[in-house]
Amino acid sequence: MTEINPATPTKLPNISFEFFPPKTEEMDRTLWDTIERLAPLNPSFVSVTYGAGGSTRERTHATIVRLLKETALTPAAHLTCVGAPKSEIDDVVTRYHEAGVRHIVALRGDPTTGIGTEYIPHPDGYKTSADLVASIRNRYPDIDVTVSAYPEKHPESADFDADIDTLKAKVDAGATRAITQVFFDNDLYFRYLDKVRARGIDIPVLPGIMPMHNFKQARAFVTRAGTTVPDWLAAKFDGLDNDAETRKLVATTVAAGQVQKLAKQGVSDFHFYTMNRADLVFAISHLLGFRPNGAQKAA
Ligand code: FAD
């Protein structure tokens, strides 16, 4: 892997941001303030998640369409196979295409009965994420399809081979990029990437970076999704339960350290789970060398 000398001016990495669709008017205001703050950093794309079981379908759609209409950003709409027949999912894709959306993050989704329970596809639905990817690409070859990747393997995968079989099936179906589940140990990412490349998968695999400003809540959430939260990380937040300001600084420092190390080891694309907050991700992007409106500095 190429070591990038931090003293040498070099090309900036690509960054992308993930948001979730707002539930209330107040959350809506927060999201759009966040977008306004982050947009001048010129992300490659911004993605909007799709609630478990399709629960946010209309809100995801509305957010994506507003991004298209009111900003110069390239939106990517998340979509899952959960709880709907193919015809309904196909309609969602058609509506996106008609609105001008050309990037979808295609996922299987979690079981409606909860993470850890058996996933049962809708009887008339897409059975796997690869089926969804194939359908989108066959119907709309101009839609760019991104998929998920799991440096610690997905909790349902029997082993890494099975996990990478799934990624391979998604790539063979037409996916052109993967975004990883959040991870905190960079070695996990590089070991996973070695396995992926050894299978002949050559698409970009963007590390998913999550600054953990609300550590306790975020830990519970990511652990359920199969991410290991190392003891050293928990120790950094020890004693800060009632000190949101310091937690924010610690979370920024930790995530900035993680991305800077990845960048030094040649990683050129980063996807940030923003949790609809601008401050931490703005600071981390700044440390990577990003400045508003293209006045970029090489890190
Ligand atoms: P896949 O990649 O299709 O499968 C994951 C793994 O499960 C595979 O590696 C495979 O080994 C195993 N597996 C799948 N099917 C089977 C089977 N039939 N038998 C045995 N093993 C099987 N969820 C949402 O609800 N909305 C979102 O917007 C959303 N966005 C996400 C974005 C990213 C970048 C990531 C990493 C995850 C996201 N998720 C989202 C979570 C995702 O829906 C869950 O992790 C879900 O459990 C798996 O969906 P997937 O597309 O990743 O699954």
Image: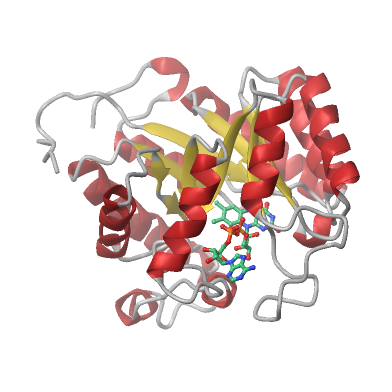
Residue 10 horizontal/vertical position (percent): 19, 25
Query: Which coloring applies here?
Result: secondary structure
Q: Is residue 149 visible?
A: no
Q: Nearer the viewer, residue 1 or 108?
A: 108
Q: Toward which corner of the image does residue 188 lie, by quadrant? A: bottom left
Residue 172 horizontal/vertical position (percent): 51, 41
Q: Nearer the viewer, residue 253 or 122?
A: 122
What residue is at 55 percent from the left and 35 percent from the top? 174
Q: Toward which corner of the image does residue 145 lie, by quadrant? A: top right
Residue 29 horizontal/vertical position (percent): 77, 41
Residue 89 horizontal/vertical position (percent): 83, 44
Q: Is residue 116 visible?
A: yes
What residue is at 63 percent from the left and 34 percent from the top? 35
Q: Is residue 231 above or below residue 251?
A: below
Residue 178 shown left or right of residue 26 in the figure: left
Query: In which quadrant is the C terminus drawn?
Result: top left
Residue 180 shown left or right of residue 121 in the figure: left
Dividing the image into four quarters, tell me where ligand 1 lies: bottom right
Residue 57 shown left or right of residue 281 in the figure: right
What residue is at 28 percent from the left and 23 percent from the top? 297
What residue is at 70 percent from the left and 45 percent from the top? 132
Q: Nearer the viewer, residue 201 or 17?
A: 201
Query: In which quadrant is the N terminus drawn?
Result: top left
Q: Nearer the viewer, residue 152 or 71?
A: 152
Q: Toward which corner of the image does residue 195 lie, by quadrant? A: bottom left
